[in-house]
Image (cartoon, rainbow, N blue to C red):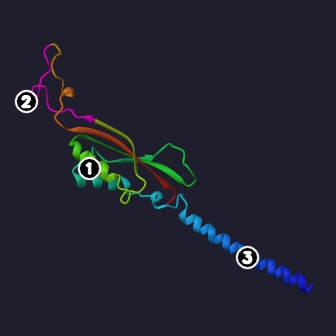
Amino acid sequence: GVAARLGASASVQSAAGEARRILTLVDEVNRSATGPQEERYRPDPRMASRLEELANGVGLKISGNISSGDGAAAAPFPGIQLKNFRAQAANQDPAIIMAWLNAAQDKAEFPGLDIYTLFLRPGASGSATTPNIPQPPPGLGPATEEAIFDGGWNIDVTFQRWERKGG
């Protein structure tokens, strides 16, 4: 009787100690593992607004507001969802566009934000009769408004980032 109870008590204490060690290891793994608890997955309901503020700060004139919505890609692990942020701007200085894109890739300021699609095109403005606009060689017809480039560029960019579901 007594020896069996002492043996059982020692086994329970040993198992309890082992359980504590396992829980400590689980906590360590959870703190260091790649997963939705990382800062880069923290939901940021102001992400679109912050990108707009950044654009204003560098002098980029966004057409309307930056739109946001859910992406379609399957999550690499449970508990996260893909968010898209789309911006468009017309006839902008390419140096300002690049400064904005570069600043938006600052991982400390915009953790987890990546450029998903980027379209840059020379902008068209003015008219074919504007002075100092080179005309096409004879035989090619008149210059069209779409063919005139005065240095501005159009951008259509979609950023993406994974975020935890439900905060």
Q: Are marks 2 and 3 in contact (CB under 8 Å)?
A: no
Q: Mark 3 points at which residue?
A: 16
- Mark before the other along the chain sequence, 3 or 1: 3
* Highlighted range, magenta: 121-138
The three-letter code of the residue at mark 2 reads Asn
Residue 18 position in % (x across, y down): 71, 73
| Mark 2 or 3: the one toward you | 3
Residue 148 quadrant: top left
**Residue drawn 20% across and 32% down?**
124
- Mark before the other along the chain sequence, 2 or 3: 3
Separation of marks 2 and 1 at Cα, in angstroms: 29 Å
| Mark 2 or 1: the one toward you | 1
Whether 155 is drawn above or below 38: the answer is above
Residue 155 quadrant: top left
- Mark before the other along the chain sequence, 2 or 1: 1
Residue 72 position in % (x across, y down): 50, 42
10 Å neighbourhood of mark 3: few (<14), some, or many (≥20)? Answer: few
Where residue 99 is drawn, which disc sits there?
1
The three-letter code of the residue at mark 3 reads Ala
Residue 61 in view (yes/no): no
Where residue 132 is drawn, which disc sits there?
2
Q: How many marks?
A: 3
Q: Are marks 3 and 1 in contact (CB under 8 Å)?
A: no
Separation of marks 2 and 3 at Cα, in angstroms: 86 Å
**Residue drawn 35% across and 59% down?**
109
